[in-house]
Amino acid sequence: MITATDLSRTYPDGTVALASTNIAIPKGQFVALIGPSGCGKSTLINLLAGLDQPTVGTANIAGRSAMVFQEPALFPWLNIRNNIEFGGKLRGVPVSKRHEQSDALLKMVHLRRFADAFPHQLSGGMRQRAAIARALMLEPDVLLMDEPFGALDAQTRSLLQQELLSIWQATGKTIVFVTHSLDEALLLADRIIFMSARPGMVVGDVLVDAPYPRDVYGHPFLTSLHTRLQDLLEKEVAAVAAAEHDDGWMPPLSVDTAFGTGEGI
Ligand SMILES: Nc1ncnc2c1ncn2[C@@H]1O[C@H](COP(=O)(O)OP(=O)(O)OP(=O)(O)O)[C@@H](O)[C@H]1O
Ligand SMILES: [Mg+2]
C-alpha cells in the first residue's frame, strides 16, 4: 500500500534529513514511526503524503491518503460540521451525501452536539477529533498522522488512542503514526519502525504481535520489547545530543518510569 524506495531528502541548506530509506507497508497495517527529535520523521511522512519532494528516490501510496497534524488544522471560520465536510465539498460530493457522511463521522468521534460550534469553542482534544473526522471524510485508504496526540493531556490522549484503535478496527485503514512515545507505539501499532538520529534511517523494524486492547506493562512480550526499544531510543537520543554539542541538553524523550529509567529527560 505504501512504498518508499531509496528515499532521501536533503534540504536546501544542506541538512540531510533522510537518507536512503526503504519501507514497504501492506494494506491495513498500523505502523508507528518512532525516533529521536529531529531524526526526520516529519520529513518522511511529508514525503509519503506528497507534501514535499524527495531529493533522491520515490515515495508512493497506492490510493488516497489524508494527513492529521500535531496541531489540528481546522478552518476557524467554519463550524465543525463544515470543517469536516470541506474535503467532500471539494470533491463535489452532493450536499445530502455529505451531511450523511458528516453525521456518521460526528457520531464516530463523539462530537454530534458540537456540529454547529466553531473550532475556538472546542478543547484541544475535541479539535483533534474533528481533524481526524475531517481526514476520514476524504475516504482515505491511508491515514498519515504526525504526532497527532502530542499536544494533548494524558487523559484526552488515552481516550483518543482508544478511539483511533476502534476506527482502525472498524475501517481497516492503513495508518502511519509518528510518535515520540514508546508506550503509545506499543499500545497502538502492529508494527514499529525505528529511525536513527539524523540523517534519518530505518534502524529497527519489529512486528508487535499482541492482541488488543493492550496492557503494555502486563504483557511479557510487550514488556521485553519495551526494554529493547527503550535502549535503542536512548542510544539514538544520546547520539543526537552528542551531535548537537550543546552542553547537557537532551532532546525530549518519553521515558516510562515504570521501567526504572527515571524521570523524563
Ligand atoms: N525546511 C527545512 N529546512 C532545513 N532543515 C529542515 C527543514 N525541515 C526540517 N529540517 C531539518 O531536518 C531534520 C529532520 O527534521 P524533521 O522535522 O523531519 O524531524 P522529526 O523527526 O519530525 O523531529 P520531531 O520529533 O522533533 O518532530 C532536522 O534536523 C531539521 O532541523
Ligand atoms: Mg516532527
Image (spheres, rainbow, N blue to C red):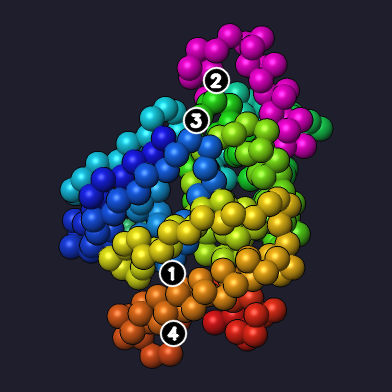
Residue underneath mark 2:
88
Tell me if residue 228 is in the magenta stretch: no
Task: Answer with mark 4 or mark 2, whichever residue precedes in sequence.
Answer: 2
Q: Position of residue 171 (x, y in %)?
A: 63, 31
Q: Quadrant of residue 170?
A: top right
Q: Amino acid at mark 3?
A: Asp
Instruction: Give the distance between the C-alpha atoms of the residues marked 4 and 2, in whole angstroms.
Output: 46 Å
Q: What residue sits right under mark 4 in the picture?
A: 249
Dividing the image into four equal quarters, which quarter contains ligand 1? bottom left
Local secondary structure at mark 4: loop
Which type of secondary structure does the marked residue at label 3 adopt? loop
Q: Foreground: 32 or 198?
A: 32
Residue of label 1: 36
Which sits earlier in the primary sequence, circle 4 or circle 3? Answer: 3
Q: Amino acid at mark 1?
A: Pro
Q: Residue furthest bottom?
A: 247
Q: Which residue is mark 3?
A: 141
User: Of callouts 4 and 1, which one flags the residue occurring earlier in the amino acid sequence?
Assistant: 1
In the picture as drawn, the residue positioned furthest to the right comes out as 113
Residue at the image position 68 percent from the left and 17 percent from the top: 99
Gap between marks 3 and 1 measured at Cα: 28 Å
The quarter of the displayed image where residue 257 is located: bottom right
Report crowding for label 2: few under 14, some 14 to 19, many 20 or more residues within 10 A (C-alpha). Answer: many
Mark 1: which secondary structure?
loop
Q: Quadrant of the C terminus?
A: bottom right
Where in the figure is residue 190, as x and y percent of width and height? 56, 51
Q: Which residues are magenta?
A: 86-110
Quadrant location of the N terminus in the rendered image:
top left
